[in-house]
Image (tube, rainbow, N blue to C red):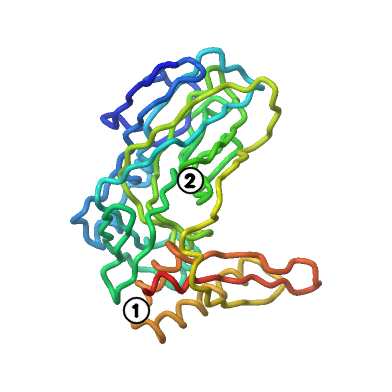
Amino acid sequence: MAEHYLDDSVTQPFWDNSVTPRLTIDPGDTVVIECAEPVGQVGSDSIADDLAKLDFSKIHALTGSIAINGAAVGDALEVEILEMRHKGWGWTGHIPAFGLLQEDFDYPFIHHWELDGDVCRFGVNGITLPFEPFPGCVGVAPADSGRLDTIPPRVNGGNVDTRDLVVGSTFWLPILAEGALFSTGDCHSAQGQGEVSGTGIESPMTVTMRFNVRRDLNIRELQIQRPSPMTKVDSAGYHITTAHGPDLMENAKNAVRYMIEWLVANHRLSESQAYCICSTAGDLKIAEIVDVPNWIVAFHMPLSIFG
């Protein structure tokens, strides 16, 4: 069981089963993976206008591919997340024509975070989040030939943006091409469930993962086992907004809009700052989906982040 190192000097902003892997390993091996800033075009000194000029064909700046010897179509790839280390900075923002409330926020905005040990400092009104990192993109090569962009999640995994992929978790993906051809990146230092603005705390990181091939598992999409607690912010209660109606997407939008109003009124944030806090700290939840004709979506904001 060897340990390997894979740098981010070459990034892969696509999924493609015809690529030549940058690294080939054996089952049981560990890889230390350098993951670039997620979109590959933002730095610690970037301004809002830079987000308006993003080239989406370069998103995401993934590191890979990694081939696993013996990984065959129909097997499952098992990956353990052993360690994630930040590099001192990250950013959150909103981008025109992107995000849950893109019709409300049709202009670019960026906010830079200071990452210090296990703390993410927002730098406004004492707001801090715990460092709870995860890779937003984890995926294998797709079954079909051709090149796919990385923006939407698919059966191969990809841009799943699932906060549960924390250190100490294990996840499984169906192997759809020989060798699996795994890539990862889009690391977040923190994120709420929903990633409503389209960004978490986007951060370059060093990630260590262990890989195995499971021939005894037959899974159709990503599955995860994670440790408790669900989040370190669960220590001081929550403020919760709700919205009802027959359309879950519209309910989700309204629940977030109500939370933005609450943050602006009670925590002296601008609307853009509040949207960023919703995306990095708040959780969208389906509270009720059985009482026809209206469903309830709730949005939970942890009070511990306000100090």
Specify the quadrant of the image occupied by residue 47: bottom left
Q: Is residue 188 above or below residue 289?
A: above
Percent of width and height locating residue 227: 55, 46
Residues packed near mark 1 inside 10 Å, few (<14), some (14 to 19) or many (20 plus): some
Specify the quadrant of the image occupied by residue 57: top left
Q: Which mark is residue 180?
A: none
Q: Is residue 55 left or right of residue 103?
A: left
- What residue is disc 2 on? 166
Residues packed near mark 2 inside 10 Å, few (<14), some (14 to 19) or many (20 plus): many
In front of the other: 1 or 153: 1
In front of the other: 4 or 141: 4
Q: Is residue 201 left or right of residue 174?
A: left
Percent of width and height locating residue 221: 64, 37
In the rendered structure, which amino acid carries the disc numbered 1? Answer: Leu
In the rendered structure, which amino acid carries the disc numbered 2? Answer: Val
Query: Disc 1 versus disc 2: distance between alpha carbons?
Result: 29 Å
Which residue corresponds to the image point at 60% horizontal and 25% vertical from the top-left?
176
Percent of width and height locating residue 68: 49, 18
Q: Earlier in the sequence, mark 1 or mark 2?
A: 2
Q: Is residue 221 above or below residue 203?
A: above
Q: Which mark is residue 269?
A: 1
Q: Nearer the viewer, mark 1 or mark 2?
A: 2
In front of the other: 109 or 144: 109
Q: Is residue 240 left or right of residue 296?
A: left
Q: Is residue 296 above or below residue 280?
A: below
Q: Is residue 155 above or below residue 29?
A: below
Which residue corresponds to the image point at 33% horizontal and 26% vertical from the top-left?
6
Count the numbered circles shown: 2
Q: Is residue 288 left or right of residue 42?
A: right
**Label 2 element class:** loop
Outermost residue toward the top? 70
**Label 1 element class:** loop
